[in-house]
Amino acid sequence: MALGLNREHLDLAEAVRGWANRHCPAELTRAAIDGPDSGSARYADTLRPRLAEQGLLGLHVPEEHGGQGYGITEAAVALEELGRALVPGGFLPTVLASAALLAGSGPPKLIAGLADGSVAGAVSLAPGVEGRAGPHDGLILDGTSSPVLGASLADIVVLPAQTDQGDVWVAVDAADLEITVLDSLDLTRPSARVQADHVSVPADRILAGLATVTATALAATLFGAEACGIADWAVQTAAEYAKLRHQFGRPIGQFQAVKHRCAWMLTAAEQAAAAVWDAARAQQGGIDGDAGREAEFAAAVAAVVAVDAAVSCANECIQVLGGIGYTWEHDAHLYYRRALSLRALLGPSGDWAQRVAALARDGVSRPPQVDLPAAAEALRAQIRDELAAIAALDAAARTERLAAAGWVTPHLPRPWGRGAEPLEQVIIAQEMQAARLRGPGLAIGAWVVPALVQYGTQAQQEQFLPPTLRGEIIWCQLFSEPGAGSDLAGLSTRAERVEGDEAGGAGWRLTGQKIWTSLAKQAAWAICVARSDPAAPKHAGITYFLVDMTAPGVSVRPLREITGDAMFNEVFLDGVFVPDHHVVGEVNGGWRVARTTLANERVSLSASWTFGCGVPELLGALRNLGREPGPALLEQAGRLVSEGHAIDLLGVRVTLKQLSGTEPGATGSVRKLLGMRHAQQVAEACWAMPGAEGALADSHWSRAVLFTRALTIGGGTTDIQLNIIGERILGLPRDPEPTPGS
């Protein structure tokens, strides 16, 4: 769940984590709590110099100002790790102050001091101080701010002054202000109220280049980065405790309620990491022009998603810990306190959600992009030339060439694909789109092809793969059964051996019922799993067959759904004969073949399966509402836009992890789980907008609400997906196997 994706960022995170373990163990944080000023002296005397020695205070500061010359993304990576370690003191407010001074073209000497640790900073995010014209083009400040994070540790306070021309940001010496330390909810880091009483600010301390939208976007990004560390700590702490704590004779992580709670926590943390990662990248260019509005959008999404994730994950962690989590001695409440403080200081997530909605309604978005290395351009030129030649052919020849040359499934080995590595797959997808080339829609065939490539005989491959890749064969999948949906290994369809004689060859007779089968009425062939050895263990004794849908004994009955349509079907197999040469893989080895698709997923840029219930449709419904939406509706829309953007980012992050050779981890599983739920929520929101019109059956969104109920059932229910995340990603114990006869 780390923010960083490439090796450099992962190495940076590891280095910062090592620094925190050495110099800021839990005992030091506890000592800071017991101090008179939340560890202020310890931070100033010990931690700040050590952070400066490591260059962490100036990661984002250009070298000409005494920094390391990186950017906000690197600062965010460091903040995530320091948040995970709950490092006390003024690191976050100082980094925010130097970032604000850089954006506002502030005094270089101040920026250098913040980077080398000789100066500490803080930033006030709320109005309260007024400014009026002073001598020599300066300002005179009067007024009192809301609580300011780290102000009592600061030498410089950056704050907005309300003037007749709007907010003007200034950098003020803390010694010129009256700073009152407050009783902070966060016990590890102080907040203070700042008061200006006729304070004179010279012209060179006025940050003419800093706008409020820039300052708040930087704060949202950096606060969000620390929130990611808090969320991840909470997820890992809860999961580890759930593995060890026993109740009723077994670990509590085996109980589905606890397992699902931890899995939902992980999804929140993954979304947070994706949103903050994107916001940090967006801030590199500042908040000017179209790119600036995109940066504002990305930061607002992070403000909605990430800080709330820290609050919810810390809260859920306490719940998983139970009584021990409610004690003063456990660190869980310290993380919860810090998360709550971040939320309060940054501002309500509902306000940020409305900001996201307003930007989105104005057409502002930030399409996910994959930035490729310069070395990819030579490969791109070659691919572009080859595809241009194909694009010039007529339709039939185009389809033939795309299939024969491996462009339809480039991730597969030749001759059925191109043996393309992740980088080449991404370029092919981009250039296919640019050339307006589309391979045939394979539908279920996209699952068949990898299975036949890996396990099929040469004869099977030659018979089925070329026409499938040309889109000439429609396939269906005979997997699910009335008694075996998500529990596919519990299937009961029988495959009985038939020995060959003079009348025909050897093979199998299939008897059983399959359900929820798409395209069964149109399909010429089916992939089917059936139990060939009933005495074998559950996942063994299953064989994978290719079934001719016109064979005697196959009957299809449409299955009417809640929408009134019949997209799915029941398929009955009554002694259907399948010859031996249509068995894929080994007899009784079909479970492995059925799982092949999971191991052969291609690299995808970002495709989201929203079935017409995504962010564009949501914004269209808002624009067609016929009235100005109220704050509640705008907040709901902003939250959905934020989640949709985060889900798209999860897809990009999977791709980038594959490109960099790092393990995608939970990202893909989380994206699948969230995507289906997101489509349902969009449909519900759009259905509710017109009010009473939603009671009509012919309403588009009434039908969409009904249709999307299937999304969290098909392909493994939400509950099963949560089990998978809990067990395979977090390592929680699996459910116990049922005892025989139960």
Image (tube, rainbow, N blue to C red):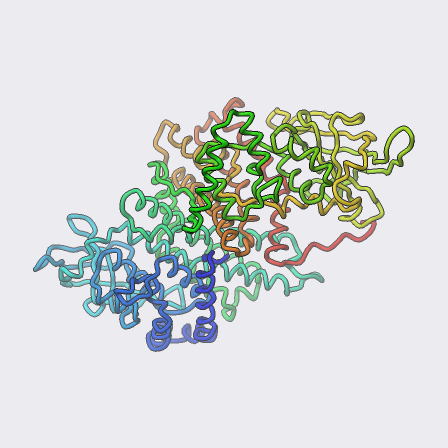
Give above or below for 717 relative to 707.
below
**Left or right side of 483 for 497:** right
Given residues 323 and 563, the one toward you in this image is: 563
Q: Residue at x 45, y 41 (%)?
A: 640
**Left or right side of 269 for 127:** left
Quadrant of residue 346 within the rendered picture: bottom left
User: In the image, residue 338 lies at what x, y percent?
Assistant: 42, 62
Quadrant of residue 60 within the rendered picture: bottom left
**Left or right side of 425 for 642:** left
Q: Residue at x 78, y 30 (%)?
A: 573
User: In the image, residue 589 lies at what x, y percent?
Assistant: 76, 46
**Residue 40 seen from this side:** no
Given residues 59 and 616, the one toward you in this image is: 59
Q: Residue at x 79, y 34 (%)?
A: 512
User: In the image, residue 643 lies at what x, y percent?
Assistant: 46, 44
Given residues 426 and 392, the one toward you in this image is: 392
**Left or right side of 198 for 538:** right
Q: Residue at x 50, y 59 (%)?
A: 232
- Farthest-out residue, left: 135
User: In the image, residue 154 lies at what x, y percent?
Assistant: 28, 68
Given residues 179 and 707, the one toward you in this image is: 707
Exactly how many numbered labels are in the figure?
A: 0
Give above or below for 698 relative to 362.
above
**Residue 277 seen from this side:** yes
- Farthest-out residue, right: 502
